[in-house]
Image: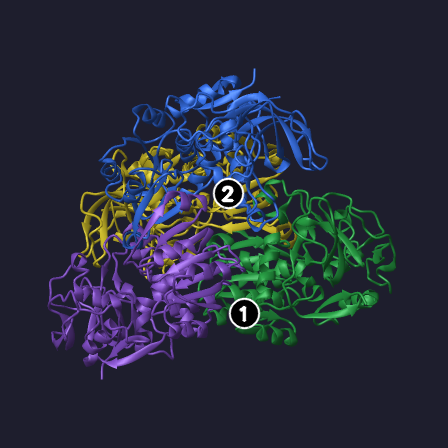
Chain colours: A green, B yellow, C purple, D blue
Amino acid sequence: MRAARLHKFDPDLSGEEFLKIEEVPDPSIDAFDDVIVRVGGAGVCRTDLHIVQGQWEEAQLMPLPYTLGHENAGWVEEVGDSVRSVRPGDAVIVLPGVTDGVCDACRRGLDNRCTELAWQGIQFDGGFAERLRTKARNLVPIPEGMTPADAAPYADAGITAYHSVRVATRGTVPGDDVVVVGVGGLGHVAIQVLRATTPARIIAIDASPEALSTATRFGADHAVLGGPDTVEQVLDLTSGRGAAAVIDFVGDGDTPTQAFAMTGTGGTQVVVGYGGSLDLQMLDIMGSERSIIGVVGGTYADLREVMALSASGRVELLVDQYPFEELNHVMTSLARGELHARAVMVHG
Amino acid sequence: MRAARLHKFDPDLSGEEFLKIEEVPDPSIDAFDDVIVRVGGAGVCRTDLHIVQGQWEEAQLMPLPYTLGHENAGWVEEVGDSVRSVRPGDAVIVLPGVTDGVCDACRRGLDNRCTELAWQGIQFDGGFAERLRTKARNLVPIPEGMTPADAAPYADAGITAYHSVRVATRGTVPGDDVVVVGVGGLGHVAIQVLRATTPARIIAIDASPEALSTATRFGADHAVLGGPDTVEQVLDLTSGRGAAAVIDFVGDGDTPTQAFAMTGTGGTQVVVGYGGSLDLQMLDIMGSERSIIGVVGGTYADLREVMALSASGRVELLVDQYPFEELNHVMTSLARGELHARAVMVHG
Amino acid sequence: MRAARLHKFDPDLSGEEFLKIEEVPDPSIDAFDDVIVRVGGAGVCRTDLHIVQGQWEEAQLMPLPYTLGHENAGWVEEVGDSVRSVRPGDAVIVLPGVTDGVCDACRRGLDNRCTELAWQGIQFDGGFAERLRTKARNLVPIPEGMTPADAAPYADAGITAYHSVRVATRGTVPGDDVVVVGVGGLGHVAIQVLRATTPARIIAIDASPEALSTATRFGADHAVLGGPDTVEQVLDLTSGRGAAAVIDFVGDGDTPTQAFAMTGTGGTQVVVGYGGSLDLQMLDIMGSERSIIGVVGGTYADLREVMALSASGRVELLVDQYPFEELNHVMTSLARGELHARAVMVHG
Amino acid sequence: MRAARLHKFDPDLSGEEFLKIEEVPDPSIDAFDDVIVRVGGAGVCRTDLHIVQGQWEEAQLMPLPYTLGHENAGWVEEVGDSVRSVRPGDAVIVLPGVTDGVCDACRRGLDNRCTELAWQGIQFDGGFAERLRTKARNLVPIPEGMTPADAAPYADAGITAYHSVRVATRGTVPGDDVVVVGVGGLGHVAIQVLRATTPARIIAIDASPEALSTATRFGADHAVLGGPDTVEQVLDLTSGRGAAAVIDFVGDGDTPTQAFAMTGTGGTQVVVGYGGSLDLQMLDIMGSERSIIGVVGGTYADLREVMALSASGRVELLVDQYPFEELNHVMTSLARGELHARAVMVHG
């Protein structure tokens, strides 16, 4: 089958071909709970660029070359002996994190904290290919009326956005304000999840007017153009109280410091984006009883839940489909900031 | 009556007489809900030194001179017209934060976040005197068998310790480890509250062997002498997982960084002590889904609850009583680190 | 002023004049925290009929005659000495339960469980009059653009509906079904609150097709005509799983038994309506880990929150206004089941 | 191997030999995740008598004859190909409910609500035998210093008691009272779990003075002899407020009604015992905002947690060991109410 594999790191993303599209053997059922999925859509994520740059080298469990792609959906083609939960032909979305199912975290429903967690497309072969191998535990049915290519980005962007909203809004009541920093692939989902599941007034922040227009279309009550007075604007919009929660999908440059400053007494700063840092004074977090909470990916239950929201029509993804063979071109566009929706690779 | 008043700031604590003990008029009932309490015990807190140094100058609502003392207990002497909840003669402990009772925070039971909060002994006259004026809302009965002098430090040290344990152990289950950093006036209460209200295994950290011996006596399962290998020791004791929660009563120097490093995946660092800072990388908090949460003081309900624990004999305070006239001497000893229990001033 | 007072009970509601509209003295400020409100709207509730029938006689604290009316809103006219939170002229809605503010329940934000709770219009003079006396603690500002007559029913029907949804949906996730039994004054608010604050799929049940049409208009996903096969229909709609929560606003006849039968494993039956009973087998509640939870009225915070939802336009009340002098006629219509929206009495 | 099998139901428990002890083939590894455990202890439970009587006939998945025994512990003897979490020789306790691990309940950590749940010793061969077959998912290591015979009853009595305390005490604060009705195999564990994990004041109720003496020894603050004035005694002990929670391990005769009556405003009645019924008036549960919640068995996480408590020495089981061949004699004694501790069968 055709697969797009990483042969060597490219720290500056200066190459023309990040991944080599080539023939590789089909994956096969090796264990009782394996499932082979014919890929119907594979999302391209900024993390793929980071992997190509070698930023994840230390965490990778697999020697080069191997196949990237961690936002996958498709159709079940073959299942291992013990698999009862899906059958060949089923349309499914693939949770990227393979988990052991027996550790304490898994047994409490916190499988994104599994002690044996391994990410498909990062730590073993992923979905930039015609077929992938995963586990029965990783599959969620795709609702009728939706194709794998429509759904694929829920597997990572979707669950991370959903999970971050869930953490941010544990105590949200009508009258509270929630800020979404960064209205990209995750942020536009988060705004819709906020609208569908909470009474929060939603304030969206982005440096791009076009992104803010998307935010408003998907339910943001206020749109704030990012800049030096962002914090002041949020304080004004919240009558000086600050936000009950700030979900920071950027996490770089000034945003962590701004996100902290716009969080109100007793409020929560949720850290999703992660390039930057925050010089945190103990006095500042103590005196206002604020919380800073990290969120990474999502759980299997999160994927079920965000798919249920999608099935009900209350959340939709902005997706552009591209032919699989154009993957390197799409990655280049992503690196240049030229994409305006989540790119999903599909096979001809 | 006699009162100990602050006449001028002493940034270096170089003076001999921090507070002037002098005659002042007795307080009187000015409002329907005022209560006059004859002081039976007034705790001396490190915050009193900070006030003398002028560190709280900005937050003070009252011009000098005024009377310090925010950990007070005594007997009700006189009540305003509307007061039904206490009667003259009742032994009571005094919540230091006077709150409006009508803001959203108060109406949700979060009165330590009241928008009109004013602290007795910091923002208006306190309990380093023979009598004090407070509000009916601020009084909790002292259980039989306990004197005001026994109870006074619960009013601040007690509720802050209790509140921090409550925040730290929201999700604690048997098998979890909770670390207490700093076994002083707050820490020795926190250890007992942990023992009385949760199944946590308790690890106490302090730079003083004597404090660690107190920790063990009050129920700590492990005592770790603070030093360069503190983090490693905690990781060893927790089989490499780190703690489910770390309550940092020091919050200065290396402790914020160490507290973060010894918190496990999904764990919580509770910030109570507040002199220092933490250089927080977004990647570190994101990848492990940790939380950092600030805690300031406690609520009226916290005071009720810690007094109930005390009444049941499951929590006790280490208190040394001193004659009121020795207040300056006691404050000097506190500044020099010579006190080994909470000092409570009593009237002859 | 004019007031509508109950002079004698009428167990069969056979009289022509339930309440006597007559001249009474204006209320006056008697205590520091009293507030006089000029009534702008007073909702008529089925409980008023129960009071007339004498069903609440035992709970009444006041001898006849007195003024009924517990769903009140209006404008502040005069305030007691200590009142800072409202000023003459403010448009306000009046929480009917007067609470002491010092008991444990009040101090934890659960003021609907206050040990000294007294209901206006039931246990002391209410709002079927030109003016009423309440406490500063009981007032919530009415948002701009809404009149007291628009808002009055939020004071009881609104907060009870809101509170019941809050209890019912503590653990609701996308994909869960919530059933609302009875789409009247409370039910039509509950459906909107569910839509505005949760991702639940909403199933409305009522014996009236007109009520079901209201339900659908306000956001119910499914409308089920009450009858002998109600349980089967709900089980069909939920793929046999039953509902995650059933909020029973009827609570009489077959509905408690049906509500229990349509609640799924781990689900919650919320009891709001209260005329009937349920023969509960321990085996049935044990084996399925169901919960049955009672809800009475709402808290001050609930009133703030449902008013915030209303201000945002996400919840609206179906209200018909009538001249105050027609009160007995309106009560007769209510008793005969002829009203199709909440009746609010207004002064000419 | 030797096994004790049920060949025919005995509704009146009139026979001499409830189970036939006979030779059967050893179990074998049939699936990748099977584990063979050599039985070191098998607890005898009142449910075993109910099974013999045919009360569970409808729920049984297996034709007679088959092997009973659902409270098992022992040593791993052989494992299926995929099993990594245990190894031959490990001392383990066996969660009786086999679950699919893929349904929504399992994926949220609520495996006791698994849609495919099957109970060992009820729905397939259990542990009244020298060996049993279970799944890797069902095993929890036994801490050092404890034998399988010491631990076996934790597998059912222990987790059910633990789980019921967890549900009962979600909001328990110092000063709250929790009542335990029935101090038998479950109740004596529940009292210890309450003591170890919560600040509740514990009131134990039992009809036997001997059981009450056990209750007091294990930490109950008050012991009440069951009788016609039980409710009054509990109301007296709680100053008229009633209990914050009542855990009813009896659930038969008068106890459901009494348990409801002694539950305070906002309190919770936890239903574990299940023979009886309760005539529930909607008005009574509504007006006091009480909850009635059912609890069945426990989860894998519950078993981990109660074993952690046991390892820490904070909970211990009252166990009497008997030779396996005396099983029928032990069951007869249990039926006659002659056992005063949990009986565990051991092999020679």
- The picture quadrant where one finds residue C299 is bottom left
Chain letter for mark 2, please.
B
Chain letter for mark 1, please.
A
Q: Position of residue C205 (x, y in %)?
A: 41, 65
Q: Which mark is residue B247?
A: 2
Label 2, residues with CA under 10 Å away: few <14, some 14-19, many ≥20 = many
Give above or below for C342 relative to B240.
below
Residue at (46% x, 26% y) in the render: D316
Residue at (31% x, 79% y) in the render: C320
Label 1, residues with CA under 10 Å away: few <14, some 14-19, many ≥20 = many
- Pointer 1 residue: A203
Relative depth, front residue between A140 and B343: A140
> Split into 4 quadrants, where in the image is the C terminus of chain D?
top right
Give the foreground label among 2 and 1. 1
Regarding residue B59, the answer to whether it shows in the image is no
Relative depth, front residue between D115 and A187: D115
Separation (CA) of disc 2 from disc 1? 33 Å
